[in-house]
Amino acid sequence: MSLSTTDIIKEQYINNLKNLLIENDNSTSNTNNEIIDEDFYEWEIDDFENFIDNADDMESPEFNICKHKWNLLLYSYFGSFIIYLQNKDIKNYNDNICTKLIFSFRNYKDPSRYKTFISSIYCFSNTNYDYYSGYKNEIYEDQYIELIKPLIEDNKIAIGVYIQVYKNNKIENYLNNLRNLIKDEDDYYDVKGENYYEWAIENWGEIEKSSGLSPNFNIDGHEWKISLYLNEAGFVKIELDNFNSYRLKDNEYFYINYTFVIRNSNDFACYKAKSSTSLKRFSKKEDKIVVEKFIESKDLYNKDEDTNKSLVEYNKAVLGVYIRIYDSEQKVNKKLTNLLKSLIKPEENYKIKEENYFEWRIDDWEKLKNCWEYSPEFNIGGYEWYIRLNPNYNDFVHLRLEIRYSFNSKENESVYANCVLVIHNISDISCFEAKVSSTMKAFNYNDWSIDFSKFIKRENLYINKDNSDKPLVQNNKIAIGAYVRVYEKL
């Protein structure tokens, strides 16, 4: 059966989209990526002008192309709109779909009248499960008026997407390089989850004018967003915000390591990456990471010697982050805790209500000022405790165990407890210094701490211990712990 004129024009239109991608690949030297599948989907929308005039969103039906499930999402605001392509079937953290695509807006009656927007090479992963997530392209009001509005007829428009899926070998090599930049220097925490997310910036000029916000993304149940600025010093500034931190309890926290990366929009081999030098903690009051000087903005346009490409090219770049999240419970060594436990003498006429160990990891020891620092709070025996530290008190490390409960208690109430405080090498628990309270303490309204004002001479932190070939402070890291035994009267 012969095709109608309209069908022939539409077929030519789809072929034109494919050819535009080929031309773009040739012009950007993106010719070495093997295409394993490609296909086209189109969505006809009624009442489009009214949608643009009102802050609203709408989703296409879910569609299957290139052996994957997708949908389109539109979000309108102040005469502008954002279009997202979202993947719906990636489940595993290490699964990725490497794509390039072209969005097309056309007159719904005439396929020869259309406007296109070609994407960067983009990596989909299972981070793209927030409602406003996925590959994002923003159509500003002036672009809408000039390019899109003339295509609307009868208040309708047809929106299409042509997707090419590439073989994953290059993205896998790239991701392995980013993973390997994260150095787990010690076996202190279990890895709870990790993944890579990237944000294709299709108009770098807008970043230079003001700033930019990535779509929300999810890694290991945590919701994140990246903010990007050019600061006054002429550097690219990156902020990573966590949206779940406010839900944490006062004594809850977790740690991450990360690698930020800016890459060429069409080449995984051309990139600049920077990794965290130590674990970063997130809590209710610590909800973001800021990298003030990721790269000088002028260096974004320097040609890489190996690829002959710059990070920002054709007004585009891709910003990515690889995040590794650790279990909030540290791996407490039973040998150490049993030793600390044995240092506390039994108390007559009292029974043990609860005893437990808490540890506070410090990854930037030299940054601590000569003033009081406080550990996260922890609960033992139904009471909130914390460690108070002065890293240089008359040339000594000064440690205290304090109880939070006492500030809200009645004057005649007491909490009976004893403790051992310990400092140890972050990766070798045989290298430690411990001090035990000589007797059980009655914590009350007027006396709420066990104090070790001369716990250890500060200079001795850097000298190898007699029973170890390591000092207490190593690679600017240290661990401070408290074994607390809470009693109640018989």
Image: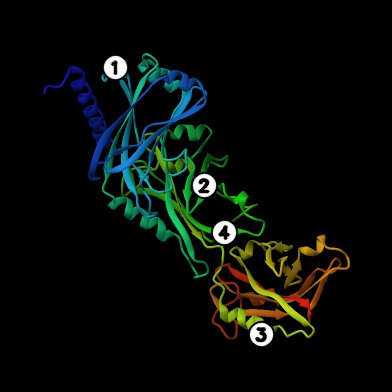
Q: Earlier in the sequence, mark 3 or mark 2?
A: 2
Residue at far left of view: 1
Residue type of the residue flagged with mark 4: Phe
The CA span between labels 1 and 3 is 84 Å
Residue at (52, 58) in percent of width and height:
256
Residue 154: image location, x then y, percent: 37, 13
Residue 440 shown left or right of residue 480 in the figure = right
Residue at (31, 47) in percent of width and height:
307
Q: Earlier in the sequence, mark 4 or mark 3?
A: 4
Residue 66 shown left or right of residue 392 in the figure = left
Q: Which residue is mark 4?
A: 254
Q: Marks 2 and 4: CB-CB under 8 Å?
A: no
Q: Can you see residue 484? A: no
Dot 4 alpha-carbon crowd within 10 angstroms: few under 14, some 14 to 19, many 20 or more: some
Q: Secondary structure at mark 4?
A: strand
Residue 289: image location, x then y, percent: 56, 51
Q: Which residue is mark 2?
A: 224
Residue at far right of view: 412
Dot 2 alpha-carbon crowd within 10 angstroms: few under 14, some 14 to 19, many 20 or more: many
Q: Marks 4 and 3: CB-CB under 8 Å?
A: no
Q: Quadrant of residue 373?
A: bottom right
The CA span between labels 1 and 4 is 55 Å
Residue 224 drawn above or below residue 445: above
Q: Marks 3 and 2: CB-CB under 8 Å?
A: no
Residue at (62, 59) in percent of width and height:
252
Residue type of the residue flagged with mark 1: Lys
